[in-house]
Amino acid sequence: MKRRGFGLVLALAVMTLIGATLSLLVLHAARMYAQRNDERARTYVRALADSGEAYAKAHAGKPGTWEPTAVSLPAADLLPRGVRGELVCTSEPGGKLRIDAAVSIGAARATQRRFVRVEPVAATRPGVEH
């Protein structure tokens, strides 16, 4: 009887250790997945802000482009499927433009704000007419 009791206790201890190890592995995998999504969101938000800055510089000298105080640019085509994003350009006093980019992947979210000086194209490249 003593042998059976010892074997049962040993089997329960081994099963408990295996369960604890599996739980730790699952927690580590979930943390790594969340960190990966955070990094992806930061990468996509940088790319989205770069696109907003390029748009602002390309449309700097065109009259009426920044008439409303905020212009929401389409971001869905710049991001992969499953990633939600938002890109808003807001005119600021003094010829500056504020670019707000936000990306979310599941629970991961990243935002970035940039300020760009917007000057007409003719002022930066002499000889170019509008």
Image (tube, grey):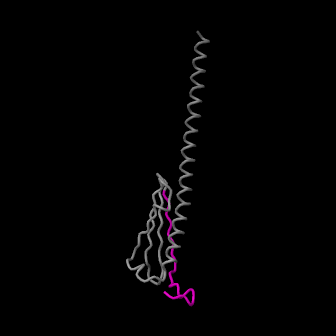
- Magenta stretch encompasses residue 19: no
Residue 50 spot, x, y in % from top left? 54, 69
| Viewer-side residue, 69 vs 130 | 130
In the figure, 11 relative to 43: above or below? above
- Magenta stretch encompasses residue 112: yes
For residue 72, which quarter of the picture?
bottom left
Q: Residue at x 43, y 74 (%)?
A: 90
Q: Residue furthest bottom?
A: 127
In the figure, 9 relative to 79: above or below? above
Residue 96 spot, x, y in % from top left? 48, 80
For residue 9, which quarter of the picture?
top right
| Viewer-side residue, 110 vs 59 | 59
Q: Residue at x 47, y 57 (%)?
A: 104
Q: Residue at x 47, y 51 (%)?
A: 106
In the figure, 26 relative to 52: above or below? above
In the figure, 54 relative to 107: above or below? below
Quarter of the picture holding the N terminus: top right
Question: What residue span does the magenta drawing correspond to?
Answer: 109-130
Q: Residue furthest top?
A: 1
Residue 38 spot, x, y in % from top left? 54, 55
Q: Residue furthest left?
A: 68
Residue 21 spot, x, y in % from top left? 59, 34
Q: Tell me how many marks there are.
A: 0
| Viewer-side residue, 83 vs 27 | 83
